[in-house]
Image (cartoon, helix red, strand yellow):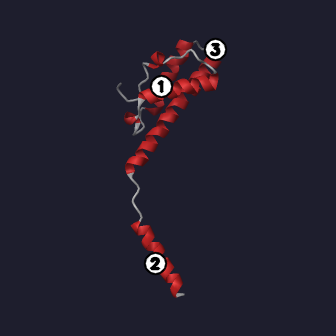
Amino acid sequence: MKAFFISLLITAIGFFISSPVIAGDDIDRQITKLENRVAKKFSKTFCNSTGFGISEEGALKFSLGETAVEFSKKPLISQVNLENIKDQILNEVSDTCYYFELSKNDLGNLTLTPGS
């Protein structure tokens, strides 16, 4: 019985003394996750739009608008790296709908922050 209480005490002390989680690492993970979600949303919208017969220009404008509306109010959106998102979008579009004619210049109007 005494050994049980000692092991319980050691376990409890271990929980209290354990190093705290660094919030910065968690925020970086959340930003990366948000960048991935933005790229996937844009790619899915673009691929669906071109699949329905909308022109590349129309699908691009529609996808840019839909993505901006959906993500503009997310708390961490101002901290994302747009260049990373553009690279991810190009990869996602080529992998998802096998569309290889989209370039980074086409994504120049990609904005995610309100009032941009």
- Dividing the picture into quadrants, the one containing residue 100 is top right
| Residue for point 43% across, 27% down | 83
* Gap in angstroms between the C-alphas marked 1 and 3: 23 Å
Sequence-earlier tag: 1 or 3: 3
The residue indicated by pointer 1 is 86
* Gap in angstroms between the C-alphas marked 1 and 2: 52 Å
Q: Please provide percent x and percent y for residue 78.
A: 37, 34
The residue indicated by pointer 2 is 9
Front label number (1 vs 3): 1
Determine whether the residue tagged by mark 2 lies in a helix, strand or loop: helix
The residue indicated by pointer 3 is 53
Give the number of callouts. 3
Query: Which of the pair 57/100 is nearer the observer?
Result: 100
| Residue for point 43% across, 48% down | 26
Front label number (3 vs 2): 2
Q: Which mark is residue 3?
A: none
State the residue lying farthest toward the bottom: 1
Q: Residues within 10 Å of mark 1 (few under 14, many from 20)?
A: many
* Gap in angstroms between the C-alphas marked 3 and 2: 67 Å
Tag 3: residue type? Gly
- Quadrant (top left, top right, bottom left, bottom right) of the C terminus: top left
